[in-house]
Amino acid sequence: MTSSTLRPLVAPVVLLGPPGAGKSTVGRRLAARLGFAYVDLDDRVGMGHLVQGGLADFRVREHAALGEVMALGAVVIAAGAGVVDTGPARERLARCCCVALDVNVDTALERIPDGTRPWLPDRAAGEPARRAAWLAREAGRAAHRAALAGDRVVDARGDADASVDAAERAVRAARIGCEPVDEVGDARQPIDGFVVADAGVAARLPRVDHVVVEAARKDAAHLFSLLAALSRGGVGRHGRVVIVGGGALLDVGGLATALHHRGTPWVAVPTTLLAMVDAALGGKTAVDVDVDGAVVRNGAGAFHPPVRAVLDPRFLATLSPAQLRHGRAEMLKHALLHGDEADIATAVDGALDDVAIARTRGIKRFVVTRDPQEAWLRMALNLGHTFAHALESRLGIPHGDSVLHGLRAALEASVAVAGLDAAFAHDARAHVRRLSPPPLPALADDDVDALLRAMRRDKKAHGGLRLVLLAGVGQPVLADVDETVVRAALRGAGGPDAV
């Protein structure tokens, strides 16, 4: 498979700043470090359009060029501060990782030769004050845009090496999304709302006016049971539902709130590590669907994020080793997507403290805030999951263990299809082994055929087998994969070095 068939699933990096900030110099070198392409947006548009057609025409062309370049995914884009002037452009920038290069006016003036910027007042024309004021305004706009995006502003007054180092640190830090400070809390404190709670934790809650769920099932019958409970409980459209439980209950309960009165606010109180790092963030709610005796995982659902999540670390002490392993599986997936060795080590056997959970949630938060409806970037979070959902539905393997086996299969396919370094894939598979998932049963030909049928029903499928793979460290891609590769990956997931 050629590289042209691989669609990068990473957020473009956009460098903002006034003329003289060093966007071109920093951008080229930053792109080389990240393994990204580099595009100067002004060069793409052609500065002659600004002189000939005026600013309004230039902004239209700039907006179109921004959309074209963003489609590359793995790209560093040098953009002028004025790109933030239009609403549509700001909406596009919200899907990127924005870094503003901050310089003072004196530094910018020293870096810009006269006559190189046709729209900039010329020093020779006796307009230094006007020139300085214009540059200061441009710098302020760039910094404001980055602040609005929740990304970074870096000091670019020093030499190029220091600026590139700072920009790289900013990009890597931005990929750990900000964690709201109010999310760590005590689930034993009263939370205003109608409570739906898992039976295993209901006794610990401070109130009695709640619905106790004996065993969360992600099916239509359970969904309608919860809908009836919300109606009986008198929950209005502007009421609030508090769902306390693991991932299955958050999924089906969240879908019930999405349907109840066409959307009712809800609060997620995850009680398992898996739910804390996955189901309680991002707003994917769903039930499984039975299709002629075969279960389609998450076959029906809605995007309906909770208005708040309350993470109570006390729940972790109640979990079994298997439940902790299932949560660490998602943490490992996030760490592989981020490409940070420290996060990978933490996922496998590090302390499960507030910082570790906040970081892994931050990796997911960075993605889902830029692509809440899973138009492209969010698909990266399905790394290993197309395999996993098939294993889960066909063989009844718990989700977390299915994810671990799915990651092994995806890593093998990544080497074959996406050019992932074999040594990195070997090390990553070793991390999976260290988590010690139960081994896969021997897969007969009929089993593999059934797994392939299940994978073709995956929501990402498009006339074939479409998988999220890794092309490099922290570089997920979407690929259409030949069946022979998938068969080999499935068998490899249960091979002798799998556990």
Image: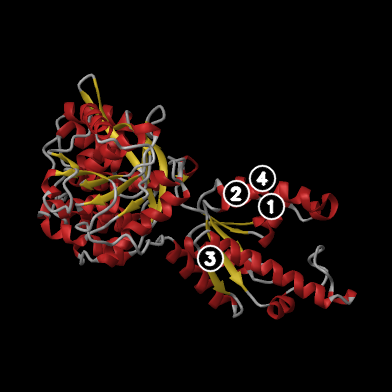
Q: Are marks 1 and 2 in contact (CB under 8 Å)?
A: yes
Mark closer to the chain start, 1 or 3? 3
Mark closer to the chain start, 4 or 1? 1
Q: Is residue 301 left or right of residue 369?
A: left
* Secondary structure found at label 3: helix
* Residue that appears at 76% across and 69% down: 134
Mark pair 4, 1: CA separation: 10 Å
Q: Are marks 4 and 2 in contact (CB under 8 Å)?
A: no
Residue 53 image offset from top left, x and y in percent = 83, 49
Question: How was the colour assigned to the protein in this rendering?
Answer: secondary structure
* Secondary structure found at label 4: helix
Say which mark, if any, is on residue 44. Answer: 1
* Residue that appears at 30% across and 58% down: 423
Mark closer to the chain start, 2 or 3? 3
Say which mark, if any, is on residue 64. Answer: 4
Mark closer to the chain start, 1 or 2? 1
Nearer the observer, 25 or 108: 108
* Residue that appears at 66% across and 78% down: 104
Nearer the observer, 337 or 177: 177
> Is label 4 or label 1 in front?
4
Residue 270 image offset from top left, x and y in percent = 24, 51
The type of residue carrying mark 3 is Leu
Residue that mark 3 sits on: 30
Q: Is residue 101 left or right of residue 250?
A: right
Q: Find the residue positioned furthest to the top.
A: 292
The type of residue carrying mark 4 is Ala
The type of residue carrying mark 1 is Arg
Residue that mark 2 sits on: 69
> Is label 4 or label 2 in front?
4
The type of residue carrying mark 2 is Val
* Secondary structure found at label 2: helix
